[in-house]
Amino acid sequence: MDLPTQIRSALQSQGLPSPSVAWIRTAMPNRNPLPPLPALVATVKTRFLAADLTNPALFDSPSPAFPPNSTNPEIKEVRLTWDIPVQVLDIENLSKSKWDQVEEIEAIARGEQTRGREIIRLPTGDEEDEFGLESQPTRAAVNGAERPGLQGRGGSTASVAAAAAAAGAASKTSTHRLVLQDCKGQKLYGLELKRIDKIGIGTLNIGEKILLKRGAILARGTLLLDPGTCTILGGKIEAWQKDWVESRLARLRAAVGADSPNAR
């Protein structure tokens, strides 16, 4: 058994989809001598999880894609008959209104987050700790005298991006809707039927890979996600993640018209 085939078998044993041997060869490090097999497997796995699934060289034909007519809303229910790897293009928390998400992200970007009767001031990434304690947030009580220097300040792009991730911490009762793409570029909504802990804004990355297992339900063009048929594989596509996070607040504002004079 040659080295790419051994790597492919090792990836399969870890529950990952099987990339083509030709793609594995391109993903292997270009050095001589090559590192040991476990290191090669780890490298190829990392590069697979960071790859765009629509790369035609990634899988052998026939590629594991959504079934025909999967977007047809007239098909009441069908179960997948094979495992399908997909990548995340978008995520939305349906348990919060868009306006609530805008306000939460803006508050965190200013360095404030409400907890009970207190405002917790969080570092925004563009300022130094005002009391010389780099890892400890400072507090200002809502119903008490304010300490000097605790007023929140407008956040930079980086602080807004960090706030977008922080604001997305998912509760156990949250329901999320994803946009999922298969290796042929077909897109479907995925809706949490049962809570999946790893799915949440700030915890699930854009470009992250998910394995939809055989038996998963596709109902009226929407995939119903539950822990039994949905495995989070990990990874992300760095450029997609950066663009999505930094534009999230702008997209939420646009969706609710928050930039208009009468928005409030």
Image (spheres, rainbow, N blue to C red):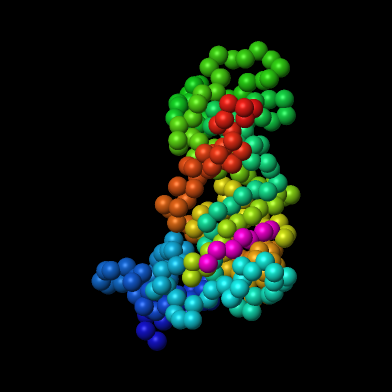
**Residue pushed farthest bottom?**
1
Q: What is the tally of numbered marks visible in this picture?
A: 0
Q: Residue at x 51, y 54 (%)?
A: 206
Say which of 217 and 128 sits in front: 217
Point out residue 99 in the picture as x, y percentages from the top left corner. 64, 37
Q: Residue at x 68, y 48 (%)?
A: 94
Point out residue 46 in the picture as x, y percentages from the top left corner. 44, 63
Residue 252 falls in image quadrant: top right
| The stretch drawn in magenta includes residue 189 | yes
Q: Residue at x 49, y 66 (%)?
A: 185
Point out residue 241 in the picture as x, y percentages from the top left corner. 47, 51
Say which of 191 and 166 sits in front: 191
Q: Main secondary structure of the magenta part?
A: strand
| The stretch drawn in magenta includes residue 118 | no
Which image quadrant: the N terminus?
bottom left
In the displayed structure, does residue 49 sit left or right of residue 146? left
Say which of 133 and 240 sits in front: 240
Tell me if residue 65 can be seen: yes
Q: Which residues are magenta?
A: 186-192
Image vertical order of residue 85 relative to residue 254, above or below? below
Tell me if residue 121 can be seen: no
Point out residue 90 in the picture as x, y percentages from the top left corner. 55, 53
Which image quadrant: the C terminus?
top right
Image vertical order of residue 69 relative to residue 259, above or below? below
Image vertical order of residue 32 relative to residue 95, above or below? below
Q: Residue at x 47, y 63 (%)?
A: 49
In the displayed structure, does residue 261 sit left or right of residue 171? left
Residue 210 falls in image quadrant: bottom right
